[in-house]
Structure formats: structure tokens, C-alpha cells
Image (cartoon, rainbow, N blue to C red):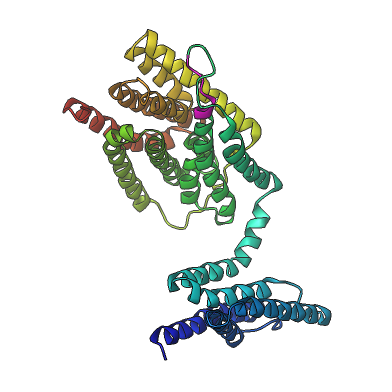
Amino acid sequence: METLFIQNTILSIVLGFLIGLQREMHIIYSQKDRDFGGTRTFAIISLLGFLSGWINEIFPYTFVVFIVMFSLMLTVAYVVNSISGSHKGTTTEFAAMVVFIIGALLNFSTPIVAVFLTIIIMFLLNLKEQIQDYEKNLTKQDFAATVFFLLMTFVILPILPNRPIDSYGLINLYKIWIMVVVVAGISFFGYIAIKLLKTKKGIAVAGIFGGLISSTAVAMSMARKIHENGLLAKNLAIAIALASSVMIIRIGLILWTFNSNLAKILIVPLLIGLVTGLGYILFIYSKIEKGQNISSEIEFKNPYDFKEALFMGVVFGFVLALVELTNRYSGSYGVYLISFLSGMADADAIVLSLSSLSSNGLSLDVAYIAIVIALVSNTIAKLGLVLFLGNKTIFKEVLIYYLISVGSLVISAWWLAASGWLS
């Protein structure tokens, strides 16, 4: 008997057994009556799938006959269980069909494919309770936003012209919409994560995933919360600092997506700012008293709301055109001024504009300095919000973080530029 046949026979039984074990555990822990089958049944189904594929090589169409007969058997089992009233779902039957196919695949593909599919199926089968929890937190608007994301990415984007539509060569709808998709996509991930993890009410969760959406929104919300309990300044400062640290990561991802050359010369300052900032966050965390609780809920706008996405596109287009015109007629100092002013409102728009333009004529040196200026002005804006909406206690904690994180970022960026890093 061939070694490969023995190996695949054993593997088919093991893979079917694993999925059957998951079904058995689900029945036990959910305290339901047994429906279709358990570990032994699924192991035999997988073995049957393997044998049907193996015999098919000798007698063609055997696999087709087996899979039709097995499908009829599953249908009959489902009808009988439904009539008896003990079974209503179809998950186990569909899982059994996939197990049959997994067994057969051992004849038609490499074993790694069957193992991979088994892991995926076990993962999906184990998600039932988590999905039910998620459904309670997600709204129809969130689902509609997901559909809109697919629409704007795979329907709207491909039909937009990838060329300037104006006589000055400033407005490229395709590039602007790509910016919207990327930034809103990162924000949407953070938005969904906040919604799904809402019940944990973790201050770190609010800061980390909130930073993917808007570090400014986190700063505003946490600064206001200091008035609820003045003793929680360090906790709130951690949330703001984490959001700002995540913003640095987000900026790095955006740069790498749109201009890898610019990302390469900015990666060192960004990493230095990130690491030093995280170091200070750990220091603050070691000083706070454990067991302090505070609500971490923050109201964010869905980044894939149609109005939000449209407004984002207008802003990106305006900033992109403004930076281009400034670079043409005012030179680098004009770009620096626009970067400072734009950064006060939003760092994403100016970073995206500089990334795009530095691939089409704008000097990398100018883009490098302008992005650092935008990050500094964005930091100043958030500090102003913390001081205005919070109080001096939380302002002091956040100020120290920014001096360490953004300060080290600026110093390292200056030192690298002075040492010829950009050339």
C-alpha cells in the first residue's frame, strides 16, 4: 500500500475529527440537543470525501456521484431534523459538506490546502457568539457604510479619470479619491474596532483605535472628561498620548502607500518620535493607581458616511491644489506656511498632498520639512484644545508627552537633514 495513501487517509480523518470536535463542543457549551453528527461522523465524512476522490482516478465521475448522493443525504437529514423540531439551523450540514470536499482535496491538491481550509472553517464556526455580540453594537448605518466603502473603492474609483480635469493641471479626481479611500479606510477600521470593543470601556482601546480615526477627537473628548474626576489626569493623558502615537503610525502608513521614497527618509524621525513617546506613556502608566475606572466612550462620525467622504474629498482636493499653486508661485516658504496652517486643522490632507506632489515635481527636501512642520502645528492645535477644554493638570501631562515625542521627532529630523540624510 502506498505511503501517500496512508498519509492522506490519516490526515483526512484528523481534519474531519477536528471540525467534528468543534461541533461537539458547541453543542455541549450551548446546551443544545445533538443535531446532525459529532466527531466520529465528521471524521468518516472527510474520509469518505478522500476515498471518493481517490476512486475517481480509477473510475471517472465517481466523485460527482458521491457528492450528489452525499448532498441528498444531508438534505434528508435536515428535513427530518426540522420536522422533529429539534433542529433549525443549517450550519452543521454546510460544515459537513465542506468537510467532504476537504477530504477530497487531498487527492487534487497539496495537503496544506486542506489543512488551511480546515483552520478557516474552525475559525468561522467558532465565531457565532462573537458575531452575535457584534451585531448588537453595529447599526444599519455601519453596514450601509461598509457597502458604501465597497462602492467607492471598486465602482467609483475605476471610472474616475486618472488625469487633471482643469487647465492648470491641479485637479486629478482619481488621485483625490484614492486619498479618500485610504484615509477613510484606516479610520473606518478604527471606527469599527471602537464599536466592537465598546463594552470593554478600556482607556487604552479608546486611545489606540481612536488614533486611527482622529487623534484630535480623542484629545477633545478626554480633555473634557477631566472635569468628571480631576484625579484621573494621568489616565486621560495616556489616552491622548496613545492616540497621537497611533497618528504617527498612520502618517507612516499613508506615506508608504503614496510615496515610498518620502517614507524612507521620514521613517527614522517617525520611529524615534514613536518610540520615545511610547516610552513616556509606559512611565506614566507605572505611576497611576490601578483599579481606577473611567468611561472611555467617544462619539466618532462614521468616516464612510457619504457626506463625510465627499467633504474629505473636497478638502484633499483644495489642499492639493493650494500646495501646488503655492509651490509654483511662492516657492518652498509658501509651502511651509500652507503646511503649518493646514496641519492646525488636519494632518492627513497636507501629508497626502505633499506625498502626491513630491512624486510630481515638488522637492523631497521641501516635502520632508513641510510634513514635519505640519505635525508640529497639529500638535500645537491639540495642545490648545487640551488647555481650553481641560485644565492645567492634564495639559501638563500631555505637554510633557509632546515635548518628548514630537520634540525628539523634530530634533532627529533636523539632525538628519543637516547631516545630509536627504541627499
Question: Viewed as shown, does residue 268 lie left or right of 22?
Answer: left
Which image quadrant: the N terminus?
bottom left
Q: Name the residue at 71% across, 47% down.
A: 140
Residue 295 in view in this figure: no
Q: Quadrant for residue 85, please give it.
A: bottom right
Q: Please provide percent x and percent y for residue 416.
A: 20, 31
Residue 207 in view in this figure: yes
Q: Name the residue at 57% across, 82% down.
A: 59
Q: Is residue 173 magenta?
A: yes
Q: Quadrant for residue 307, please give it.
A: top right
Q: Name the residue at 68% across, 75% down.
A: 93
Which image quadrant: the C terminus?
top left
Q: Is residue 24 above or below residue 206?
A: below
Q: Nearer the viewer, residue 319 or 222?
A: 319
Q: Is residue 65 magenta?
A: no
Q: Is residue 56 above or below residue 162?
A: below
Q: Please provide percent x and percent y for residue 214.
A: 50, 37
Q: Please provide percent x and percent y for residue 114.
A: 49, 72
Q: Is residue 199 above or below residue 333?
A: below
Q: Is residue 205 above or below residue 349?
A: below
Looking at the image, the residue that sits furthest to the right is 83
Looking at the image, the residue that sits furthest to the top is 329
Q: Please provide percent x and percent y for residue 287.
A: 35, 51
Q: Which residues are magenta?
A: 169-176
